[in-house]
Image (cartoon, helix red, strand yellow):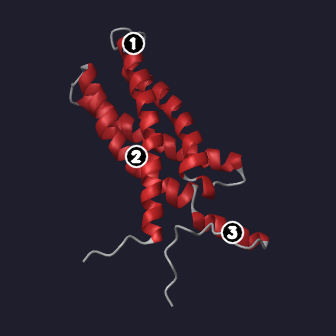
Amino acid sequence: MQNAPTSAQQRLMSQLVKFGLVGGIGFVLDVGIFTALRLTVLSPEAMHEGPLVAKVVSTTVAILANWIGNRYWTFGPHRSSNTAREAVEFLVVSLLGMGIGLGCLWVSHYALGFTSVLADNISSNVIGLLLGSLFRFTLYRHWVYSPRRQKRRAGRLGVPDAGHDALAAPANG
């Protein structure tokens, strides 16, 4: 007999689904823009570093779309009232995640010599995206939009906790 999922597990699954849907929109933007740029003005024939520049541009657009979706939907109840700090933290995590994708693209395109559009998309938009997404979700959940941070901040300000710790593990005792 299998136990029914706990409310914390259900909230985690809800976050993962929302993160995946927001990421799906970002993915479509990222791949579409990357491929369009890679095939045109930022092709390797037009610019040696074209695929890398195309990836930076496409990922930047996707990061903006993902910040809006994650801030207001995926992690909405846990977003910070300090939008500037949250945006900087989100950007730092996103840029590190972009670095993972760029690293995969660089290794594939320049170190291994797989230079086709398909190879560039597989290395950056499949392998890099999967590794980067795991990294980003973990840091968004436990740092940028951490329910525990909201609770600590509320405690310092003397504000009663309004359920911001909904995803934290229950205390034993």
Q: Which mark is residue 47?
A: 1
**Occupied quadrant, residue 120:** top left
Is 75 placed left or right of 132 in the picture?
right
Task: Check disc 1 and report its element: helix, strand or loop.
Answer: loop
Percent coordinates x, y for residue 94 in the rendering = 50, 42
- Which of the pair 9/116 is nearer the observer? 9
Mark 2: which amino acid? Ser
Q: Which residue is mark 3?
A: 162
Percent coordinates x, y for residue 15 in the rendering = 47, 55
Q: Is residue 165 above or below residue 82?
A: below
Task: Check disc 3 and report its element: helix, strand or loop.
Answer: loop
Q: Which residue is mark 2?
A: 133
- Mark 3 surroundings: few (<14), some (14-19) or many (≥20) residues within 10 A: few
> Which mark sits nearer the N-terminus, 1 or 2?
1
Residue shown at the point (56%, 35%) measured from the top left: 64
Q: Nearer the viewer, mark 1 or mark 2?
A: 2
Residue shown at the point (70%, 47%) measured from the top left: 83
Residue shown at the point (69%, 72%) measured from the top left: 161
Mark 3: which amino acid? Ala
